[in-house]
Image (spheres, rainbow, N blue to C red):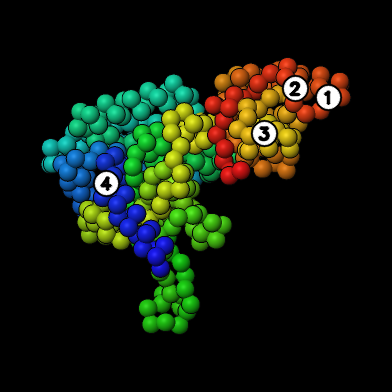
Amino acid sequence: MQTEQKMEAERQKLLRAARRVVIKVGTAIVTGADGKFCVEAVEPIARSIIELIEGGRQVVLVSSGAVGLGRGWLGLHPSRLDDLVTRQACAAVGQSLLMDAYKSLFAAGGIKVAQVLLTEDDFRNWGRYSNLRHTIEKLLGFGVLPIVNENDTVSTAELESPSTGATGSRAAAFSDNDGLAALVMSGLEADALVLLTNVDGLIREQTPGRADSSADGALSEVIPLIHEITPELKALARGRSAGGRGGMSTKLDAAEIAMNCGSITVIANGQAPNVLGRIFAGEAIGTAFLPSKRVRGKRRWIAYAADVRGRVVVDAGAHRAITRGKASLLASGIVRIESHFAPMDVVSIVDSGGREFARGIANFASDEAERFSAKKAARGAAGGSASAPVLVTRDNIVLLEKA
């Protein structure tokens, strides 16, 4: 009980104190069944955002809905969205409709808005990532509300189905606006991430038969506080939302990024009365995810925003040296290269069992690393070597698991 009380006190403290926040609204809120902008649902949220800004908070809005608005404007049947190019065309039409609607809503409160369209390249390159942060910070300094969406007209990462390749889950992280909101939160080092959807939070089905159970006999309750995302929680979150590309699973992934970056996340029903005001007043609404650690700056980019280009399998000695000895990764510790990379690419570092435990920036290309490994095998060498080149310098390594 004492632990729960402390967690609740921390939730209230973090949300009341949050000065820079990222708020994401989903398609189910933004777009009505008729394919038009749902003013009735979005206007209360806009009023709350205006109040947050007037209260001294900096807000970045990540909004879905462009594809749905474009489809409605063009009069297309929902089945037409099965085609990728059609979805891109709908996004091109709908994005201007989305911004026009937001411009009108926020102008009523004297707030100017700016459109920020992003692609995965803005996160995989450190220079572009830094420029993005500086631009959004300048907009916030001007008192402008940045409204962020993926540039679906030229980027397909969000429009295509999420996939996980050999190097991890970067495609999945950018495959919906939940992941995009988390990456924006990470880049800006925001204090809080709020994901507004059409459900009350992460829901657990309870024992059937009670009077307040659902139609199928299962009792539902919102999990109010989470301090660790477990496999059991991920199992609860499976499935996609109606009308959108994400679902509770993608929101859990976004919350996990925020937790690891030291920020609090809240998943809540965007149609609840004054939902944002209540959240930042500290009221217990939705599901809150408490931060677990804090990674900053370039190390945060390596862990969560950069596109992983290579996969390096290391031996047990290198694994111990990196996780326990805080060492760099020497080329002598490499067992094999499973996917190729260039100098300055972010690589996935995995153990002999194929489990990724770290990421880092490569000092040289994979072909050079392979040449050194071949020479080592020919000599019958074992373990590290003082003459072995450093593939990844310690300052450019981020651990993804505890030692």
Report, in whole angstroms, how far the alpha carbon at label 3 lies from the one at label 4. 39 Å
Tell me what residue is drawn at x 49 percent, y 31 percent. 299
Q: Secondary structure at mark 2?
A: loop
Mark in front: 3 vs 1? 3
| Residue at image mark 3 | 321
| Residue at image mark 1 | 381
| Residue at image mark 4 | 17
Residue 216 visible in the snapshot: no
Q: Please report contact status of discs 1 and 2: CB closer than 8 Å, yes or no.
A: yes
The three-letter code of the residue at mark 4 reads Ala
Tell me what residue is drawn at x 41 percent, y 62 percent. 3
Q: Please report contact status of discs 4 and 1: CB closer than 8 Å, yes or no.
A: no
**Vertical arrangement, residue 135 with respect to residue 81, above or below:** above
Tell me what residue is drawn at x 34 percent, y 39 percent. 190
Image position of 176 (left or right of 401)? left
- Residue 114's mark? none
Few, some or many residues within 10 Å of mark 4 (<14, 14–19, 20+): some
